[in-house]
Each structure stands twice: as C-alpha cells, then as structure tokens.
Amino acid sequence: MEKVYADASVSVTDLKKNPTAVIEQAEGFPVAILNHNKPAAYLVPAASFELLMDKLEDVELAVLVRSRQKERKIKVALDDL
C-alpha cells in the first residue's frame, strides 16, 4: 500500500458526487483522492498551494544564488554605473 500524505481521504467517486462537501469537511487541510484505494491526487486549499509555490520559487532562487557564488567577482564602483 502506498503512503498517503494527508490525514483525510476520499474516493474519486465520492468526490464526484459532492466536491463542495469534501472541501468543506476538509476544513482547510489536504485531502488524498483515492482511486482503487491508491492516492491518485491531493486536494489542497488554495492558500496552501500558493504558499507551496512561493517556497518552491525560494528554493529555485537559492540554487541560482549558490551557483552564481562560484562565478568570478567583478568590482564595480558606484560612480561607474
């Protein structure tokens, strides 16, 4: 059996019957959507998804900064700009 990364779960069939009820019952927490008792998707609140996207962007920027730290540094005077 696969690991489920949510405290709540619902079948695809039940989600189709009443998606609004599933969202309301989740009370802002993620819900695993199961297909034949295996996670097929996760339903996450919009605010959580947006926060996740911000964090991923931060990680990508950190990787870029680290890669550029290895580049040769060029000294520039403010007056030259």
Image (spheres, helix red, strand yellow):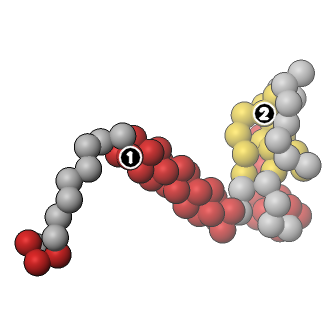
**Spot occupied by residue 11 in the image (x, y as percentages of width and height):** 84, 40
In the picture shown, does residue 50 fall above or below 9? Answer: below
**Spot occupied by residue 74 in the image (x, y as percentages of width and height):** 20, 53
Packing grade of label 1 (10 A; few <14, some 14-19, many >=20) is few
Residue tagged 2: 39
Residue positioned 11% across, 78% down in the render: 79
Residue at the left extreme of this rendering: 80
Q: Looking at the figure, which quarter contains the C terminus?
A: bottom left
Secondary structure at numbered mark 1: helix
In the picture shown, does residue 79 fall above or below 16? Answer: below
Packing grade of label 2 (10 A; few <14, some 14-19, many >=20) is many
**Spot occupied by residue 46 in the image (x, y as percentages of width and height):** 64, 65
Q: In this view, does 16 lie to the left or right of 58?
A: right
Q: Looking at the figure, which quarter contains the N terminus?
A: top right
Mark 2 is on which residue type?
Pro
Mark 1 is on which residue type?
Gln
Residue at the top extreme of this rendering: 1
Q: Is residue 65 left or right of residue 17?
A: left
- Observer able to see residue 37: yes
Residue tagged 1: 69
- Observer able to see residue 18: no
Decide which of 23, 71 is in the foreground and name it: 71
**Spot occupied by residue 28 in the image (x, y as percentages of width and height):** 80, 66
Secondary structure at numbered mark 2: strand
